[in-house]
Amino acid sequence: MAEADLKTPPMYVVGSVDHALRAAVMLQLEGGLTVSQVADRLGVARSTAHRLLQTLVYRDFAVQDDQRVYHPGPVLELATYSQSFVSRLRGRALPHLQRLVDVVGESANLTIRTGDRTRFIASVECGQALRVGSREGMVFPAHRTTAGLVLLAELPPSEVDELYAEEHYAERLEERPDMAKLRTQLARVRRAGFAVNDGLSERGVVAIGVPVRDEDGTAVAGLSISMPSVRYDRDMLPSLVTTLHRAVGAIEAGGLAATGTSSS
């Protein structure tokens, strides 16, 4: 590589940030790594490597197994989607999210699912002073988001049970959902074709979502609008759902070829 092509490091490199980013890339590209391996690769003390990895775990960039080996976490696993597909989906959806916001006057989001997590890949905020802020890039438990419920409802009940099997939560701090309640929620969403989330992700916020499908009819994302609960009028639900479906139709127009879809 010619010298002119080499990256010039910024004048003020934050060492801990640089180390954390390098560790995250190592996990994503190489899979399982121990504290010692990360420490050796980064040239830092094991205690420093341990703190870095624990921070990555806290932020869902890594998970630790029973053997104390670290693996890519939900945020990095979402990259198992075809990046070209996610990029194309986001690029195609953004103008329609903006039009949706212009029509309903509330914030809009596009979300994908990997396993029991969802990630917001596009957000457009409305202009109202009291509004739901951008969620772009954020990762949430699927059962606590509108799009997550929409996408989970597309799965056979047996796959949902496997996804939320008790053993998957043995070493995780978060609470496993009430499966009876979740099954009831998903059955309701399945029948209706849309989801209403009243305070599941955040108190005081109501969201409504519908699925976005690829050219084979597989739900690959969820499109939703979010608003402060004080502005939510249940009588407007049919109109809001119709508007969401109209926006989805525009996004799907021409077909979405998904090279890599959400994994369970």
Image: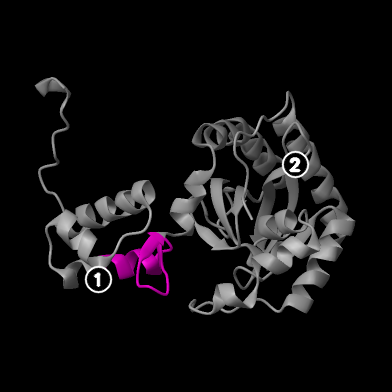
- In terms of depth relative to the viewer, which is nearer, 139 or 29? 29
- In the image, is residue 205 above or below residue 221? below
The quarter of the picture where residue 103 lies is: top right
Q: Secondary structure at mark 1?
A: helix
Q: Amino acid at mark 1?
A: Arg
> Which region is colored magenta?
52-71
For the residue carrying disc 1, how many other residues have a C-alpha within 10 Å: few (<14), some (14-19), or many (20+)? few
- Camera-nearest residue between 32 and 222: 32
Q: Is residue 168 visible?
A: yes
Q: Which residue is mark 1?
A: 51
* Residue 121, above or below 83: below
Q: Quick check: is 53 in the magenta stretch?
A: yes
Nearer-the-camera pick, 255 or 28: 28
Snapshot colouring: one colour
The amino acid beneath tag 2 is Thr
Classify mark 2: helix, strand or loop: loop
Q: Residue at x 21, y 56 (%)?
A: 19
- Asked if residue 251 lies in the magenta stretch, the reply is no
Q: Quadrant of residue 195?
A: bottom right
Residue 255, above or below 241: above
| In the image: residue 237, left or right of residue 177 | right
Determine which residue is flagged by label 2.
Answer: 218
